[in-house]
Amino acid sequence: MTCEKSVEITAFLKGEVPEGERESLRLHFDRCAVCSEDLAKQERILRSLSSIDRVEASPTFTWRVREAFLRAHPEYIQPAVPDRRTIWESIWASLQVMPAWVISVAAHTVLLAVLAVLVFSHRWTGEGREEEVIIKVRRWEPRRGLIGHVAPDGPSPREYTPGAIPDPNREAFEDAMRGWRHRLAIDRAHAGFIASRKPQDSHAIRSALGWLARHQQPDGRWSAPAMRAEDGAEVSHSVGVTGLCLLAFLSDGRTSKSGDSVDTVKKGLDYLLSQQKASGLIGPDRGSYLYDHAIGALALLEAWMATREERLEAPASAAVNYSMSSQNATGGWGYASRAPDNDTSVGGWQILLLRLAEIQGNAGVLPSLVQGGAQVRAWTDTDGKVGYRAPKQFPNGPYALCAIGMLSHVLATPSPDRSLLEKQSRILLERSPIQGAESNDLYFAHFGSLALHQLGGSAWTRWWTPLEGKLLEAQRADGSWPEAFDRWHLQAGPVYTTSIATLILETPVRYPRLTE
Amino acid sequence: MHGDWDKLEDASLIAAFQRGKLAAFTQLVDRHQRSLINFFFHLSWDRQVAEDCAQEVFLRLYSHLDGYEPQAKFTTFLFRIARNLWIDRMRAEAARGGKPASLEAPSGYGGERPLGQRVSAPSSTPVDIVARRETQEALRQAIDRLPEEQRAVLILSELEGLKYQEIGEILEIPVGTVKSRMHAAMEKLKEMLADGEPR
């Protein structure tokens, strides 16, 4: 048995019937047994359909689309000029309507300007090769923006000048700088990645961040145990640990402007800002303070890139400049500003900071970055191992250093050496960073994850799948990791353990893959 | 300015995108990715395919912008590109000897029990969890067996929540046709689920 009105049932249920007909249809459906039964059936089907699975986009979807778009439309980076005439056509068209005396004055002015440039540039520069280098370096002068700020009474950013590095390296330096010219355009496409990070659908990360938020001090810092510096004074690494915690929140897309942790992030940033000196240095200048400074600077820079919050721009800029100015004459970084004894681990953080500054459009960091990369490369063995304070020196084993060296190579080189990366990845895969209690090395896991994520492919999968599983397995119900889970816990404390474990879990969404 | 993109209407974002603001494009991707990915997911039941297709739609968007009229709804414009992309994809697949482009032929449905018996309400006991998985599978198969033009209308209406008017604009058919296809789709679903009503 059928009813001619039954064709209206679906539209009725979907609210697609004109208002005027709705009431009469409802009365009919109430009275008509055929329609009433049909309507009930359709209601049940529609209810079932509403429960059907829906999927969420992958966390990196937006970034992947943007990358693909820029690959497909490279011309978009330099949008076409609306006026389709060439410059010469435009000038010719203007000349047609210009009085003769105006043309004459303009031509003489241009001629005088050209003569002046020729005369004065000859006086200012030396001769031969140095002149050429000076001109090239001047082209890399920072644009207005983040790098435009230099702390008023701080040291000037380190700049490459002829003679600052030995002559045999100069050619390699120039080659690297030429390579970066091409890389800059590509990296512009990565600039929005930090701002596009979003909270992950991960209970482990959510609960870890919850634990960190509960352990923040009222002044915004996260505490670390005090350590005795070389001069005997007790120094805290709270700046570094606060930086790590902030990076963990920022990597999950939680900023001082959006997400569920606005107050926590804001207070953490307030603390870092309160610790910054006029020179740009964040934290005290005692002990191994360049570690803390670099991590704190990275947190400020990422926070600024994510939010463009005005109050962060100048401090982040001054912090980046301080890192450049603290680089020593060999291109490396030690525990203290311009300390001559390089420390590969400290250098790794500085290089990460400088590359991120480059990605956001700061070409002014390139000389420092190139020299930092060259220094790490100089300490890299033919088999891929990287020394700690000298080549072939591995006081705590080669693994963490190899991971830092590999990441530094990716970050400080416009075109990384693939065969070197593969050698280094084989070293990293020799030993799991999670071996059990006292042998666990989360610092190795952190840099190993960042480095292998950059390489991608099967090396990354082989590294990541077991590591992620072991980390999740060890996480406590309150979101933290046991303090003794990491070999460095006595020096760094429980907040370090949980913050760095969280950062490791966030690796896949922390930074864009620059090797692609 | 950077943080303000999310406050702009689609039409303003498109205008900014045309002026060379990549962040406006990113905002559009952020805003519409979920519905596009789910549209393709409900057509393919494959998350990877869904993301690939959604990405392709956003890439095609750039070359289609000349055809966008600011007074029109952007979702409609975007889904029209999505719909055409899916047709292209199905034609290409048919040309390679894969799934027929018409999609009229039923998919390989062959469960031990009638579809309707496998459709049940969500609940939480282990037995019910299994039953719920079966429900999802049964619904998927039922949707797959619909003729392609009915399936598209059903997905856009029921799973994407679009109005008949918008669906008509996307598929370039009159609203009356949307209505009749939706009715026909429901009739087919009723038939397929005849031996066991959804509870």
Image: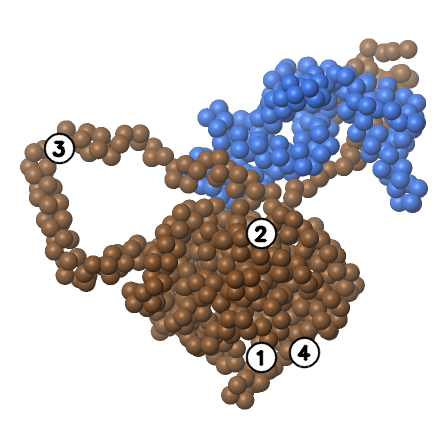
Chain colours: A brown, B blue
* For marks 1 and 3 on the same chain, the one whose residue lies earlier in the sequence: 3
Camera-near label (3 vs 2) is 2
State the residue position of label 3.
A98
* For marks 2 and 1 on the same chain, the one whose residue lies earlier in the sequence: 1
Disc 2 versus disc 1: distance between alpha carbons?
35 Å
Disc 2 versus disc 4: distance between alpha carbons?
32 Å
Residues at marks 3 and 4 touching, judged by CB atoms closer than 8 Å = no
Tag 4: residue type? Leu
Chain letter for mark 1? A
Is residue A99 in view from this perspective? Answer: yes
Chain letter for mark 2? A
* For marks 3 and 2 on the same chain, the one whose residue lies earlier in the sequence: 3
Graded by Cα atoms within 10 Å as few (under 14), some (14 to 19) or many (20 or more), the crowding at tag 2 reads many
Q: Is residue A335 left or right of residue A10?
A: left
The disc at residue A236 is 1
Q: Is residue A3 left or right of residue A64?
A: right
User: Looking at the image, which residue is at 67% across and 26% down?
Assistant: B163
Q: Is residue A391 left or right of residue A113?
A: right
User: Looking at the image, which residue is at 40% across and 51% down?
Assistant: A179
Camera-near label (1 vs 3) is 1
State the residue position of label 4.
A490
